[in-house]
Image: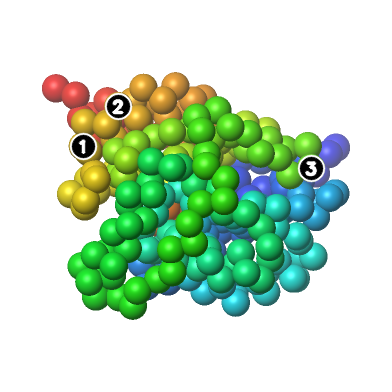
């Protein structure tokens, strides 16, 4: 009999194949979920939202002998973008972000004042993301989905082979991203979630920008803002 081991990466499923390396590291005062993905064969890595605590991120990269191929920013809020310039300097990896969030990055001084936090460096964009863009580490493809609403250039990253979605601050466990900050749009965030994210398979694991993981199916049913329970 094959011994089934609980998957350390996808939490809710029993996997037969070992998943790719995936560390979710909550960083900074707002505990932004920084995702570090690594391919076991090629040792290539993708780091999503290195908002702070770059030394901690670097020590994980070193521990697993990973080389960063891309730094992906889901949106230009300080808690997600704050460590990107430093991580690029130490790894040489390009920063991927939507050009539609350049305007959000311009508000970093306003964000710092609003949240009473030190100003962070705007890394700029090395590679502008577009809907449908793919990047790969080893044989695993990462796909860019435009999910505006929390900010104009908010993106989500789908990893079909892993059954995972990195949702940034678009979708949370039984919540959605706030839209009251500059550039936020409540109609667009609902459209992004219902027309795009909710078309993904129910079992897709959602790794939000903050807090615990959830699944598309759970949010379709229980999300009080966009789920079945939100409808009269
Ligand atoms: Zn945000």
How far apart marks 1 and 3 lie (CA) works out to 37 Å
Tell me whether the residue at label 1 lies in contact with that at label 2, contact meaning CB atoms closer than 8 angstroms.
no
Tell me whether the residue at label 2 lies in contact with that at label 3, contact meaning CB atoms closer than 8 angstroms.
no
Crowd band around label 1 with a 10 angstrom C-alpha radius: few (<14), some (14–19), many (20+) = some
76 or 31: which is nearer to us?
Answer: 76
Q: Quadrant of residue 15?
A: top right
Q: Quadrant of the N terminus?
A: top right
**Residue at the (38%, 41%) spot, across then down:** 100
Q: Quadrant of the C terminus?
A: top left
Please give the residue where the numbered disc 3 appears in the rendered image. Answer: 138
| Chain-order first, disc 2 or disc 3 | 3
How far apart marks 1 and 2 lie (CA) works out to 9 Å
Mark 3, secondary structure of its residue: loop
Q: Is residue 109 above or below residue 205?
A: below
**Residue at the (76%, 65%) spot, across then down:** 64
| Chain-order first, disc 1 or disc 2 | 1
Q: Is residue 17 above or below residue 75?
A: above
Image coords of residue 6 (percent x, y): 67, 48
Please give the residue where the numbered disc 2 appears in the rendered image. Answer: 191
Mark 1, secondary structure of its residue: helix
Number of callouts in the render? 3
Image coords of residue 91 (percent x, y): 68, 65
Classify residue 194 as left or right of residue 141.
Answer: left
Image coords of residue 65 (percent x, y): 79, 65
Classify residue 47 as left or right of residue 34.
Answer: right
CB of mark 1 near ligand 1 (< 8 Å) = no
Please give the residue where the numbered disc 1 appears in the rendered image. Answer: 186
């Amino acid at each position: 009999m094959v011994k089934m081991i609980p998957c350390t990466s996808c939490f809710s499923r029993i996997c037969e194949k070992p998943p790719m390396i995936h560390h979710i590291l909550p960083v900074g005062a707002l505990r932004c979920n920084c995702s570090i993905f690594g391919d076991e064969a090629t040792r290539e890595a993708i780091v999503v939202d290195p908002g702070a605590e770059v030394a901690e991120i670097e020590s994980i990269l070193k521990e697993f002998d990973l080389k960063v191929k891309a730094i992906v920013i889901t949106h230009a809020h300080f808690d997600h973008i704050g460590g990107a310039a430093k991580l690029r300097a130490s790894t040489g990896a390009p920063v991927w972000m939507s050009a539609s969030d350049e305007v959000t990055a311009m508000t970093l001084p306003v964000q710092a004042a609003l949240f009473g936090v030190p100003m962070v460096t705007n890394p700029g964009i090395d590679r502008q993301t577009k809907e449908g863009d793919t990047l790969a580490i080893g044989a695993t493809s990462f796909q860019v989905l435009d999910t505006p609403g929390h900010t104009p250039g908010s993106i989500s990253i789908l990893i079909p082979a892993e059954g995972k979605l990195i949702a940034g601050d678009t979708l949370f466990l039984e919540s959605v991203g706030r839209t009251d900050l500059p550039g936020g749009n409540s109609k667009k965030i609902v459209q992004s979630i219902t027309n795009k994210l909710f078309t993904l398979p129910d079992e897709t694991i959602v790794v939000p920008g903050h807090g615990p993981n959830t699944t598309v199916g759970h949010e379709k049913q229980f999300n009080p803002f966009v789920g079945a329970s939100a409808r009269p």
